[in-house]
Amino acid sequence: MSDSKSDSDEQLSATESTRLTSEFDSRQTVPPEPTNPTPDPVEEDSIEEIGAYRVEKLLGRGGMGNVYLGFDKGLERYAAIKLIGEHLATSEEAQLRLATDARSAARLNHPNIVQVYAYGQDAEKTYIAFEFIDGRDLDQMIKAQGHLHLGDTMKFIKQAAKGLLI
């Protein structure tokens, strides 16, 4: 009896391992296909590099600054680079918030949470480099579809909850 339980435990572990490997393999480490046929220009100040990253394009704008697609030349992988905005560059509170965000996120390790690759300053520009995962975010999906089906909504809530439980 204990042998059959042991075999089923090994089988479950192999199944779980395959699922986790599959999730990990879906993350982008090769050049992403552009989701926007006309990418935004980098920005007026023409940021070409920050830290170890070659800046390729603007991904989005937010209250604290901009997020760029960057390529790590040394490790040959893409990253999302959150760069603090010029309007907050001299704010000690904003600098502290970004540092706290970076340290907090760097302590987390879960398939449903992006990894922090780097935090630092380059030419007085403070940044965090995160794992880049290509595709649409939830906001883009809702805008495109108008609403989400209940099954999809439950799937996304479950994924977010798994990330929060760590």
Image: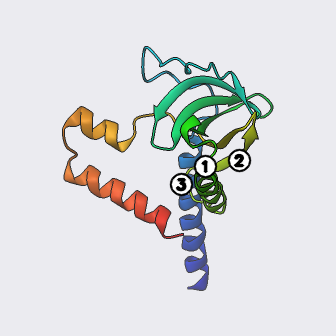
Rendering quarter of residue 13: bottom right
Query: Along the horizontal axis of the image, is 161 left or right of 14?
Result: left
Give the residue pinned by disc 2: 119
Q: Is residue 12 above or below residue 52?
A: below
Q: Amino acid at mark 1?
A: Ser
Q: Residue furthest top?
A: 38
Q: Is residue 143 above or below residue 158?
A: above
Residue in front for this viewpoint, 121 or 10: 121
Q: Position of residue 162 (x, y in %)?
A: 46, 64
Q: Earlier in the sequence, mark 1 or mark 3?
A: 1
> Which dot marks residue 138?
none
Give the residue pinned by disc 1: 91
Q: Earlier in the sequence, mark 3 or mark 2?
A: 3
Q: Amino acid at mark 2?
A: Tyr
Q: Position of residue 52 (x, y in %)?
A: 77, 33
Q: Amino acid at mark 3?
A: Ile
Rendering quarter of residue 48: top right
Q: Residue furthest front?
A: 90
Closer to the observer: label 1 or label 3? 1
What residue appears at the point 26 percent right and 40 percent down from the top-left corner? 142
Give the residue pinned by disc 3: 113
